[in-house]
Amino acid sequence: MRTKEKEAELLKRDSTIPNDSAIALDKLVFGYERNLLNINKISIDIKKGQYVSVIGHNVSGKSTLAKLIDGILVQNSGDIFIFGVKMTDANALLLRKDIGLVFQNPDSQFIGATVRDDIAFGLENSNIPSYEMDAIIRECAKQVGMLDYLDSEPSSLSGGQKQRVALAGVIARKPKILIMDEAGAMLDPKGKKSIRDFIKNTKETEPDLTVLNITHEIDEAYDSDRVIALNGGKIVLDGSPKEVFTHDTLLKSIGLDIPFANKLNNDLKGLGWDLGPINSDEELLNKLCR
Amino acid sequence: MNLTLGKYSPFNTVIHRLDSRIKLVSLIVFMVSVFLNYGSAYMNLVVYAGIFLILFIISLIGHVSFLQLFRSLKGLWVMVLFILILNLLLPGKTSGDIAFTIGSLNVYYLTIINVSYILVRLILVMMMTNVFTSTTKPMEMTGALEWLFYPLKFIGFPIHKIAMAISLALRFIPTLAEETDKIMKAQASRGVDFKQGKFKDKIKAIVSLIIPLFMSAFMTSGELADAMEARGYDPNAKRTRYRAYRWSLKDTCGVILSALFLAGMIVLAVKQYDLFALLNVSLPILS
Amino acid sequence: MPITLKNVNHIYDEGLPTQRMALSDINLIFEDHCFTALIGETGSGKSTLIQHLNGLLLPTSGIVSVNDYVIDMTLEYKKKHGQETNVVDKRKMAKKHRKKLKEIKSLRKRVGLVFQFPEYQIFEETVIKDVSYGPKNFGATPDQALQSAKRALSLVGLDKSYYERSPFELSGGEKRRVAIAGIIALNPDVLVLDEPTVGLDAAGEEMLMNLLTDIYKNGTSIIIATHNMDVVLKYANRAIVLDQGKIIKDTTPLILFQNHDFIKQSSLLPPKVFSFALSLKSKGFNIDLARIKDTETLAKEIMRVKNEAQK
């Protein structure tokens, strides 16, 4: 049994990391195989309460990054700091208590036999006393709109419903960092929207929650404060959504989509009408109608 | 897709609501009692009839389907026939009196009695197992087994990990069944015929089903492991339980009844009272 | 090769408490050389409908005919086998039924069906073997199958270097192309795809849709079930909307996206490019909506209107 003192020592803050840092990565390197690096010297600092979108083509390293931050994968070299504490084999599980990670596949992250049991799984791992669990389960189910389905089995639920249950199971552990690894990728538009709305609402009610949203959807990226674009395991763009999405050619060259207004603006420029930099659909509309 | 696993019938009877641990223990008690010897063949018959009656009543209360029982028994007729023939052809050393003869084969009373024992015990065991699986959800059964094998933890047996593995397997059976269906349809769209065709083709057809299924299962298990870890699962750490067992009056009654029953059976087996002698009924002696 | 559905109903689990009507009185004709988009939420009946097109599922009642071959097995089947109308799960087979089933099976060569995440059906040791598997099942000689496979692989953009590689080493996008090649190798007259772009990134999606367009230009009809309205606008010339097993709209994408009331009622989101064009039009730009397929065509249209206005 770990004593309080041992725990405190494992969670000692590194003084070189600023106080308001939630996730800090220092020259992180990782490869599944010997000669192929999925993460190639990534250094980044994400502040508490930031809402960051991570975009990149399918093998750019996004999911790998999420798993490294959560300590599910161990890096080849480099350091990971969660709230200033350097992650080691000894304290990874402790640090993971503050991190919630939602994956893409609704089926393979549904652990319990019913919705109830699935939300309870995380609570069991946190050693919450069993008599406290029901209230938490109901609260979380309500938050994601699955309160009427507590005794449903996964085979009777849609993909969107299962993803909402996964969210409930993750937030039940009250994480301070929420990572969504393309949580809406396998859902229909309705499902995608419910995930997107959930993140927006949660950020409003919990402004201190740090959110890392890995996504393909540009509209979702626009909801966030900061967009990071990955390619070949490296960061190629890092800034506000506005800044990042002006780099059309670069984005296209790394296999990514660009916002509608930017696309149309580029096409018009190609045909001879240069409207200058455009940042939104309304702006483009107004400029055209002058 | 509608999958009733382990032939569980979703009713809400007293039996269904009983703690699954009681049911498991009672099942074991019943099984033990069926294999004890209570004296003469007649006494055994009486006891077996008594057990049958008890099971019958429980089945009625628990809305247990007898149709299911018949179906399972029907499936075993080959084995029963085999046992019958074996016993007829190879009677033991002390064969005793001959009941009748078929051609050159002697059929002894003892043979008839032994085969009857086998049949009756088989029917009773299947009956009690049917009651158990019809009234207990698979998850509850796993819970009861986990509780029963708890002491093994102290000799290093990873009972909690095994129970977790079993629960996950149960949870994924419907999912894998759906996956199988999808793969079969996809291969059928490529012209695969799972029922007809040459033997070689059928083998290829099965391979075209099994390999994707295994790949899918491996991928799912990798993703599942990540998801479990992400929610803080540590197989070696202590965990609380959501489904805590809640004891109630009926469970206490169940314990008492089971205990009395077991005690009664043991007494009968040891003392070997002869009911018929007590009632002054004389029966032919079968040796 | 037209596919016709007349009064088709499909009920799952008939007689059981989980009974539900997946398709209700469907009447459709899929003509030759058409690019059709099937739109609908999960549970609308899209997948069920698709599986009727190549005989994988038989209607509970109603008639499906593929190029005049009528699949009329349903009623006989019901009498013999109770509720089971799923062709893949057959039990006792009478010779007549076996013959009928063989005929239905041959349909699958002419109507090629690609399921969602088709890469999961790959199982052979090499790419070329997997793609040849389909044609072989329909009676092609090893040589013929090889030729069909090579042709199909070049259509999906996978060259010789891929032939002997293990499909399991490939990336997700490449695997998907191998799976689709496996169906294209059957040389179907109609290609039906269920959500072919799910899980692909922007580049992958573009590549796939270009591939489908090429196949379409070569004479194959395409039917895709999709959520992606941009794809519907850009590629399809017919849009069918399903809701709870019924067809609620059967029209062109252009007419569909201009129907404001319908769009509001349903949970459909028209493609951005179209909404933008509508906004421009309402502000006085005289855009010809029929010409709008994507941002390029919209830009051209805007320039055309601008140049005309300046004259």
Image (cartoon, coloured by chain):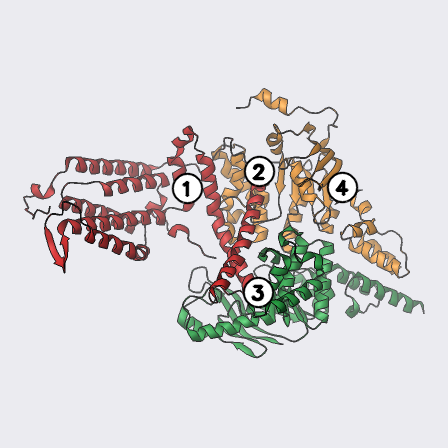
Chain colours: A orange, B red, C green
Question: Which quadrant, please, contains the C terminus of chain A?
Answer: bottom right
Of all chains, the one bearing label 2 is B
Residue that mark 3 sits on: B190
Query: Disc 2 versus disc 3: distance between alpha carbons?
Result: 39 Å
* Whether residue B58 can be seen here: yes
Whether B262 is drawn above or below C234: the answer is: above
Measure the C-alpha gap from mark 2 to mark 4: 26 Å
Q: Earlier in the sequence, mark 2 or mark 3?
A: 3
- C-beta proximity under 8 Å, tags 1 and 3: no
- Camera-side residue of C146 and A83: C146
Asked if residue C37 shows in the view, the reply is no
Residue type at mark 3: give it: Arg
Amino acid type at mark 1: Thr
Measured from the top left, where is residue A162 in percent x and y? 56, 49
Q: Secondary structure at mark 4?
A: strand
Which residue corresponds to mark 2?
Answer: B229
Q: CA distance from mark 2 to mark 1?
A: 22 Å
Q: CA distance from mark 3 to mark 4?
A: 41 Å
**How far across and down, in percent of the image, does residue A4 sit?**
57, 21
In what element is the residue under mark 2? helix
Alpha carbon of mark 4 to alpha carbon of mark 1: how far?
47 Å
Q: What separation in Å lies between label 1 and label 3 (alpha carbons)?
A: 40 Å
Give the labeled residue for mark 1: B142
Mark 4 = which residue? A234
Check disc 4: other Cα within 10 Å, few if <14, some if 14-19, many if 20+. many
Query: Which numbered marker is on residue B286?
Result: none
The picture quadrant where one finds residue C195 is bottom right
Q: Tell which of C163 and B236 is nearer to you.
A: C163
Q: Point out the frontmost of discs 2 and 3.
A: 3
